[in-house]
Image: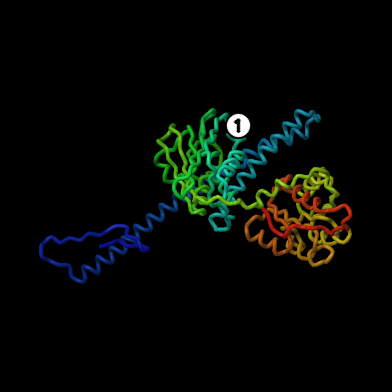
Amino acid sequence: MPLLARGRILGVLALALRSPGREFDADALAMASDLAGRAATALDNALLYGKIQEEDRRKDEFLAMLAHELRNPLAPISNAIHVLQMSDQAPAKLNWATEVIGRQLKQLVRLVDDLLDVSRVTRGKIELKIESVDVGDVVVAAVETSRPYVDALDHTLTVLLPPERLWLKGDFARVAQVLANLINNAAKYTDRGGRISVTATREGTEIVFRVRDTGVGIPKELLSSIFEPFTQIDRTLDRSRGGLGLGLTLVRRLVEMHGGRVLAQSEGPGLGSEFTVALPAASPARVAEGEARDSARFSPVVPLDLRVLVVDDNQDVAESTAVLLRMSGCDVHVVYDGDEALRAMPRLRPDAVLLDIGLPKVNGYQVAERIRAEPEHRRTLIVAISGYGQEEHRLQSQQSGFDYHIVKPIDPPVLTGLLASLWSHRGPSAPENVVSFPQRKTAE
């Protein structure tokens, strides 16, 4: 008699009679059926309990990892700030403190980005911009992203591409992210001075990437779960390898969103590993110019002669943004809530408004809508600067009248690049606030 629970057969209940030729009567069969149902429920509950325990253990491990990984960059940042406060302004000390803060800030941003990306993929909030992607270009982009990490560990990185150009069907930025995550993973789990190789070939209707390393390898018992969230080979207390265990989870889910597949192989501990990614091939086509590469055009060659209003209730964010823009030649004014921003608009008549979303009193969406409602401000560049980066927030920004949506922390070259595009459209005789803009869009 099958042990059925939630449409699955978990086992069978066998019944037997001592005397041959006898048959079970209706009462015996009913009792057996009841026992089978009870046994199936008990087995199902036991399996669920075991699964919950495992997920709870992984959750606790993840929270411990998260606390450890976030504290790591915060400690040197704190030390560097103390050095700046106590420094006698010696250039060497100032340069050291600046470099430490910059490096650790990138690490914090990477951790937060991984968390957000996993959340977006899990909830189906990432939309792929599918186009014909040059395989050589996407490999170069991934290597450029990973190069500082690889070089810091003195690894030798070899890239082998076929002589003919290959094309795949995918999202350029996300495919580059997949490859960069695999290269970073190889670098992290390979002892200093190791070797990493990246190859790309066409096999039938697929483009196949392989990332090999001479690292610590993967135990066979972990091969089946290596792509699960928060899974890591290094579970030692010192956590020398770092990370949250999300990189490979992102790899698998992004590859599957492209209709591809990913496979991990290793002969065991100490024998290195190989990750294979197969994505749909595409016919050669002109690669569309994407928003992710627009910033290459945004390089100001002269100081920006623009009046900018910065609106953010976080005074440190507002003032630091103002400092960056003033260094680029902008006339910058700062306010700290939506009401102040609306009162300042008629007086300042700014060329651009950098507007936080989560403002007190009047939020950023409402401020943008009221600015756009005034005829004299309909051509003003309005940029959302926000910690909210989900798809629904970017869509609401676009509907509220924003031209761009930038997720904090602000990348200074991107911000000055957007303003440079505004400056470049201004002719010397153009009346104030009469400028030519690209079609309104949002960009993360």
Residue located beneath label 1 in the image: 152
Category of crowding for the residue at label 1, using alpha-carbon neighbours closer than 10 angstroms: few (below 14), some (14–19), many (at least 20): few
Tell me residue 358's x, y (percent).
72, 58
Query: Toward the viewer: 66 or 193?
Result: 193
The structure's colour scheme is rainbow
Tell me residue 149's x, y (percent).
60, 35
Q: How many marks?
A: 1
The quadrant where residue 176 appears: top right
Direction bottom: furthest residue:
26
User: Vertically, is 374 above or below 331?
Assistant: below
The residue sitting at 57% across, 29% down in the picture is 154
The residue sitting at 37% across, 63% down in the picture is 6
Tell me residue 99's x, y (percent).
70, 34
The residue sitting at 58% across, 47% down in the picture is 114
Tell me if I can see residue 212 in this picture.
yes
Q: What element carries label 1?
A: helix
Tell me residue 135's x, y (percent).
55, 44
Q: In this view, does 28 lie to the left or right of 327?
A: left
Looking at the rendered structure, the kind of residue marked 1 is: Ala
Q: Is residue 323 left or right of residue 107?
A: right
Q: Is residue 41 left or right of residue 114?
A: left
